[in-house]
Image (cartoon, helix red, strand yellow):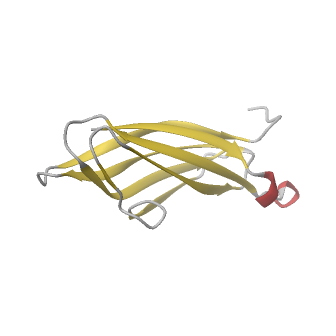
Amino acid sequence: MFKIKVDTAFWPEHSDPANDVYVFVYTVQITNVGQKSAQLLSRHWVITDGFGTTREVRGDGVVGVQPKIAAGESFEYSSSCPLSTPFGRMHGEYYCVDETGAQFIVDISQFLLTAPNTVH
């Protein structure tokens, strides 16, 4: 079983608010709190901007890898998400398999993407 922790930040160096481009970086820490090693095979993100427009992203692994995480170990990665509004939210799931071949899904709770000084 995986425990998920997400930290987010606005990325001003890659944003252009005058043209409605707001880029956020998010760092995910995945900790295997189970008794067996497991591998993250694929991901599914649901990204919603401040207008309520939703897009979905699916793909193999995360940041180009399908990490195998031993019991008691963690894997951390960072990625980014552009939005057309200064705030939004994300949630999703990881599709995984443990060392016995049993498949499982890890829900990623919703987290907010918010630029500084944003009222919403």
Residue at image position (45%, 67%) is 64
In the displayed structure, 118 sits above or below 95; it is: above
Total marks placed = 0
Please give left or right for residue 119 compared with residue 24 in the image: right
Residue at image position (26%, 41%) is 71
Question: Which of the 4 image quarters holds residue 65?
Answer: bottom left
In the displayed structure, 35 sits above or below 37; it is: above
Camera-side residue of 84 and 92:
92
Residue at image position (88%, 57%) is 18
Q: In which quarter of the image is the C terminus?
A: top right
Whole-percent x, y for residue 56 in the image: 48, 57
Whole-percent x, y for residue 13 in the image: 81, 57
Camera-side residue of 94 and 66:
66
Q: Quadrant of the N terminus?
A: top left
Please give left or right for residue 84 compared with residue 39 in the image: right
Residue at image position (49%, 63%) is 63
Whole-percent x, y for residue 93 in the image: 38, 47
Camera-side residue of 57 and 120:
57
Please give left or right for residue 38 compared with residue 9 in the image: left
Whole-percent x, y for residue 46 in the image: 48, 50
